[in-house]
Image (cartoon, grey):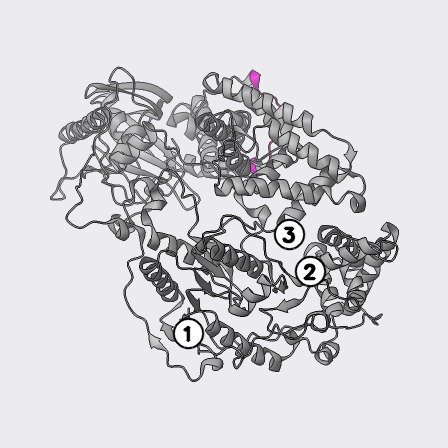
Amino acid sequence: MFKLPVDIKGHLQRGGTLLVPTSYRLRAVQLAHAAAEIAAARTVWASVDVLTPSGWARRECERLAEAAPDEWPRLLSATEEWLLWREAAWQAAQGHPLLDSRPLAESLQRASELAAAYHIPLRPADGDTEAALLYEAQRGVEARCRSLNATTLRDLLPRLEQRARAAPLLLRGFDSIPPWLGRVGGDSGVRAAAASPGEARVRAVRAEDGLAQLEAIARWCRERLSAQADARLLVMLPGPPGPRERLARLIEDGLDPRARIAPTPAARATVAIEAGDAFGSLALPSHALLTLGILAGAPVERERISAWLTAPYWSAPGAAPRAHLARLLRERGAMSLGLRELLGALQLAPRQHRMAARELDIRLRQAQRRMGEGSGSTRRWSERFEAGLAALGWPGELAAQSTGHRLRLRWRELLEQFGELAPCAGSLDRDAALELLRALALRSTGRGVDDGAPVTLSGALADPVVLYDGIWVGSLSADQLPIPATPDPFLPLRAQLTAGVPEANAGARRRQAEVLRAAWRASTRELVLSVPAQDEDRRLLPSPVFAGLTFEDDRRAGRLWLPLQLQRAARTEQICDVRGVSFNALTPLPAGTRALTLQNACAFRAYAELRLGALPPEYAEPGVPMNQRGLLLHGALQALWEEVRDSQRLAALEPGALQALIDRCVRRAAHAVQAEAATGRRRARRANDAQFDLFAVLSPALERECQRAIGLIQRLCALERTRPPFTVEATEHVAELALGGGRVRMRLDRVDRIAGGRAVLDYKSGRPGSPDWYGERPTHPQLLAYLAALGSDVLALATVNITAREVRFTGVAATNDLLPKVRATTGPSGALADWSAQQLAWRTLIERLIRAFLSGDAQIDPAPGACDHCHITDICRIGAHQTPESSVHADEADD
């Protein structure tokens, strides 16, 4: 459990005030005191007086101002100071177009506070320097303070040093004490090794790499908490936040792997992360900010609108209707939507989703009215923002004592802080108020979310202040400890060294490392220090601070992966369920021949996509999408062959006349594609010429695609002229195949009449590859279905591959002279095979696919290359090691 050191405990019991450097150490002291009171069987106790230096200074200034109000001006709140520095930084950065004033404001404020703490005067600086920028921003803040008849905490520190204290002070957890704090509180905050002899058992660990270090820490946490359920552990891991997030996941999986798959989350978190993500980036407040932006009419990307609708922070409509509406917006909406466009899209919802769309429409309009427009103070806008969210039903039902409930309370605190800015911010319009609220949310932290967690992760190397049952300090390489010197860029380096700023002095950093080492030993009974041996391709050396320690290799294999934790040997039953619900044979197969293509590639994908609706999400892409490229070629070729009709007329056309005809057909198809792009239909019947707007302007991307299509079709016509005589019998021919107890509706791109029979052609705009016609899983089952539907007089099957690389026919035929470079069918020995017998074999194969689909076959057995572009591999969980290798490029089907 948390424990307080004897000196801190006695000081607090005597009514003294304890100062600690950060709010995280402050919360640790409060929790340790509460744990001691609970252990003593007390139900009510007095709160301890523990503060950060700025919090104590602000309280003292307010106390002195109450005693002598005429002598002390109004003290700005911390949020008001932040706003003034934000405005001053923006003004100071006007002459520097490359500076971003938002992070600059916090840096300038931190530099100003550092100068006040170490008595570094700010003077005018010559030239375009960082010191000059700080001086100008400081003057701007002071001018705004005078206009408000107020002052900042920085300006009151000199007066505070000369005043008597209301209660004795004790400083703990400081590796160095600024001069102003030393005058008011003494030098008792630096804990020396001689003053607190360490009794901890110290162990040094040398991990193989960063991941091995994380696994070793997670294993240690699991072992310590398994041995002592009420233990409190502290893990300090400097560096970027990513490894700490991963470590938290490992610890949670190791402690309670079943909680990850539980229907409801645990009431209490097992890991707390200090200085985590900004409050505005967390899920619940981020959803609130996005909602307010949508209500304000700001355009939002289609994908963000979809994520906003599917978030759990709604009371109504239900989750399933909102998911359907999100899908409709992804498929039919524009790239970005404002509120007006969103409301218009909801009006076009299909009948089955119209009720949910109407309910969402009503809620959005009510929320927009309650939020209002015009200008107002931040206090007024905080009320309007809350009213708008309430009208929309945000944030839905939240369980008591849950993380979401605590974040909801934190959101209300944020609105209160926002309202306190009214004296400084003045009157703001809606967009400015919302931008200010968003900036304040990103500045704040989601504090208090994980109080009471048994494991605390920290990214700072600091004095723990309280006593833990175990402390692990990781990543203690030579470049992490001593902490590198980082002088403030806005203050002169010589002034920082003269004033004794520890961040600017390498020697002070070395002394700080020794203080930290002693503090860690004095704060626990078990101290573990670790350093990875390697970081990617970089070898790491242990910190020189621990030169006397012997680092042991930790190469124990961990079992922290969740499936391994849940596995119970010899007690797991395996059920192989490869069949779903049978399909109604009276209904045609969905998606036509695509059902056969998917069933041939992988039965599970066919069932998931066509029976369960597991469709891939649509994403915006530059240029013309692949489906529109295919539609353009199909439409242009259909129009071309409806006029040309046969090889004789094609040969008679002059080059100029043929080019003009191709250009006209391509333009006609392009207008049809552009007009039908918003309908979501992949293939629509071509409209009459009278329906086209001859003055419609094509988009630049589609205009470029037209030029490409014209060149490709010219190359195809040149190839068609080398064929034996033929007549185009049908284009976009609609047929139906009744076979195997089912029906398949299909649309054939083109059927040619040739000598002795017919040829079936299918346009492809993807790579041709090397198709397989004779295996158990042929590459183009749709062509075999066309063959079965048309009858025995079909003598050739081929795809017409139209790509920039080449234009060619790829297929099989009864003889070698029917289509250019299309060979006759061959048997296993390579000799010519009987075409009629091969037709019968293909018909049998198509019948088998139809019967399998009708029976609900959903076996996970992908063909080679079928998983390369599949969007449901996360559902089937086949794993890369089980996926058959692809021998050819996946064909980009456009039908």
**Which secondary structure, mark 1?**
loop
683 to the left or right of 136: left
Q: Which residues are magenta?
A: 690-702
What's the CA distance linking mark 2 and mark 3?
A: 22 Å
Q: Main secondary structure of the magenta part?
A: loop
- Please state which amino acid type lies under the numbered disc 2: Trp
> Residue 694, located in which quarter of the rendered image?
top right
Q: Is residue 421 visible?
A: yes
The residue at the far left in this view is 829
Q: Name the residue beneath numbered marker 1.
A: 200
The residue mark sitting in front, 2 or 3, is 2
Image marks 3 and 1: residues in contact by CB distance under 8 Å: no
Q: Earlier in the sequence, mark 3 or mark 1?
A: 1
- Please state which amino acid type lies under the numbered disc 1: Ala
Q: Earlier in the sequence, mark 2 or mark 3?
A: 2
Image marks 2 and 1: residues in contact by CB distance under 8 Å: no
Residue at 44% x, 36% y is 617
Q: Name the residue beneath numbered marker 2.
A: 56
Q: Earlier in the sequence, mark 2 or mark 1?
A: 2
User: How far across and down, in percent of the image, does residue 183 sit?
Assistant: 73, 73
User: How far across and down, in percent of the image, does residue 16 sit?
Assistant: 63, 63
For disc 1, the neighbor class at 10 Å (few under 14, some 14 to 19, many from 20) is: some
Q: Name the residue beneath numbered marker 3.
A: 443
